[in-house]
Image (tube, coloured by chain):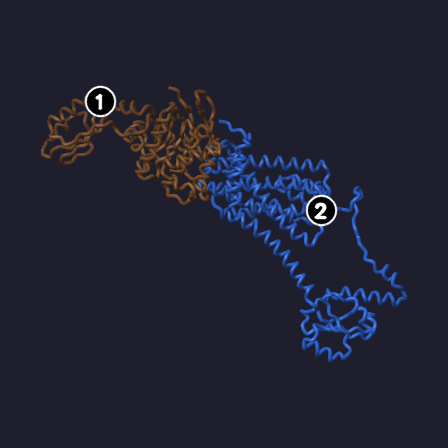
Amino acid sequence: MEEILQVENLSKSFGGKIAVDNISFSVPRGQILGFLGPNGAGKTTSLRIIMGILNPDKGDIFFNFNGKPSSLDKTKVGYLPEEKGLYEEAKVLPNLIYIGQLKGMKKNSARQKAQKWLERVGLEEYANQKFDKLSRGMKQKVQFIASVLHDPEFLVLDEPFAGLDPVNQNFFMQVVRELQEQGKTILFSAHQMNLVEEICDSIFLINKGKQILSGNLKEIKESYKEYNVNIYFNPENDPSFLLDNPDIQINKKNIGYLNFTFQGDNKINKLIDQITANLDLKEIQASPPPLHDIFINAVQERGEEVDENQFA
Amino acid sequence: MKKSMKISLPNAKKVAKWEFTKGIRTPMFLVLTFVIPLLILGIGSLEFITQEFRQAQTMELALIDNTGEIGPRLLEQTENTNIQLEIFTGSQEELKQKTLNGAYDGFLIITPENLREGHFQIFSGDPRNIAPAQIRPHLEKVITEFRLESLGLVKEEISSATRPVSLGVQALEEEAPFAIARFLVPIALGMILLLSVIFSGQMLMYGVIKEKRNRVVEILLSSISSFDLLTGKIMGYGLLSLLQVGIWTTAGLLTASRFVNFQDLGLSLEIILPPFIIFLLGYIMLASLFAALGATMKEAEEGSQAQGLIILIPMIPLFLSGLLITAPNALWVRIFTHIPPFIPAMALLRMGATTLPWWEMGTIVLALLLSIVLFIYIGSRIFSRGILQYEAIGFKDLSKILRKKY
């Protein structure tokens, strides 16, 4: 598959502190790549280097627009920075038109596109409001429009869901999916892994500047050969046959409820048959492990520690 | 990943247009641009109105003339003026009482003694009602003519002897008299430069600090280069400054036209153009310094303190204007005229005091152009690297930014 971005051996440090340590990854055209890791992992620094805002100490970045290898063409890339903001005293529409013009759009086209996008996100009434009069969620929507207004081939979104309520988070995820359906390639960073894993095609996990894990999300999950299982059953039943199974590790136990990890890969069907035969089941859920757990496992396998507070 | 310092003029123009239209609507710009000309016009009008009022105010004076000669002549001389003169024939005590009772603003006594000594006194109940400057020229003329007549001169001889003397200065290589504009234009532009740098330079610096605080800079730098962004900002604020200067100059000229005949100043393109070039390039140089300074700061309060310092440094030559005007071609003066950030103020002051040789104009313009490129380069490096720190930048960070890839 053709790659729109290729990052090779990228390193960056600030005053002796390593922010990004020799990372390499690529973004296949038309896919959504989640650049994931806890706060302070080096995600924003990496994205700023990709966007040409910072220079790397080491490493190379290659783009491929319209099937041709090229350097960074800022008119073909949309960028939503982590530190969000536009001109506070200026009105919403002029703010968007200005950013569109800087991205190479004609004024009229920028105006039309901005109006369409404002309608799409339900902010058409606010076109002539000053930016600083908007709520945080509205500001984030306007800032998002600024990054997609010029119809870029490649979209770089740095923490697009941070600080949003669940309704707005869902809204943004839906828009990201729509953009992918239109053929856009999307690279986004986030620290709320469980929230974003459902929209990623592939992931790149980073911790303390170092590459932890990368690849196709489905393949990574399958490679773990592990299931997280929740069962709800009649409280009078005895689930002890599960406790004796060497492939099962109990995480949580209540009367009529069990949560456990099953490391049996293709034996999962057999296990479900066994459970349904022995217990009066009310509900059963068996799913691959969440991304968060995969990340923690991968970091611990490297002999490193994870600070759970960094995911807040 | 190497970034070139090549400028994209279309991008810079877009930024300039945005900054200009944004800046022109700010209350600070509107107040400074229109309040200052109103003040200039107001002060001019006040001067004009008070003069008119003073001339329209009639001064009623009585005169005891013990010589019998001066009274009638002075009466004739002050006809059709705002001095109402009356020859009083009563006693001095009587006149004093009448004056104190308000019949006259004051009285004058002319005796052979004070005619000989040339010293006269107006007595008044309220001296604030007396404007000696109004009556003195009339009295002086009458007495001088009387004295000359006493020496036996006839009317034509007196007219010849009292013809006013004028003194002009003629440049050897020019046919026309020395144009005062050669002095006035550079000095006036120096003053305007100071005001422009104080006001629009301040706006530019606060604009940069604000952009840093609003976090808008990251999206700008992901769209265009820091060099284009900074150049556009300087262009935009430069245009704002030119508009402001244009409005101020128009107001100043309108006010001055009440007192000065512009034809006498000898204004010409040849006189205006060279100092204007220095003014323009000087403004760009100082504006880029302000923008770079703004990029190193976190808060506007910090900016206002530092701004005092940065205004002071380039304007030091203005405080040494006395020295510069008396020795405009001294070696140290010539050297400092080529060292940024003193170039614009030094050059303008020297242009007011002397005519700079063409080769020196060339080296000054070259030094200015090089300084502009240097300051914009340094400014854009700080702008693109330092601005993302969202904190104040110390000297240590600054040297790092300038020395290596950041």
Asked if residue A18 can be seen in this view, the reply is no
Q: Position of residue B334 (x, y in %)?
A: 69, 41
Please tell me which residue is depicted at 49% across the width and 35% down the height of the picture: B384
Whether tag 2 and tag 1 are in contact, CB under 8 A, the answer is no
Q: Secondary structure at mark 2?
A: helix
Q: Quadrant of the N terminus of chain A?
A: top left
Please tell me which residue is depicted at 40% across the width and 42% down the height of the picture: A126
B192, B405: nearer the viewer: B192
Q: Which amino acid is tagged 2?
A: Ala
Q: Which of the chains bears the disc numbered 2?
A: B
Q: Which chain is brown?
A: A
Residue on which the image places disc 2: B181
Q: Nearer the viewer, mark 2 or mark 1?
A: 2
B297, A283: nearer the viewer: A283
Q: Secondary structure at mark 1?
A: helix
Q: Is residue A170 left or right of residue B61?
A: left
Q: Few, some or many C-alpha atoms within 10 Å of disc 2 (few <14, some 14-19, many ≥20)?
A: many
Q: Position of residue A193 (x, y in %)?
A: 31, 32
Q: Which chain is blue?
A: B
Residue on which the image places disc 1: A265
Residue B90 drawn above or below residue A31: below
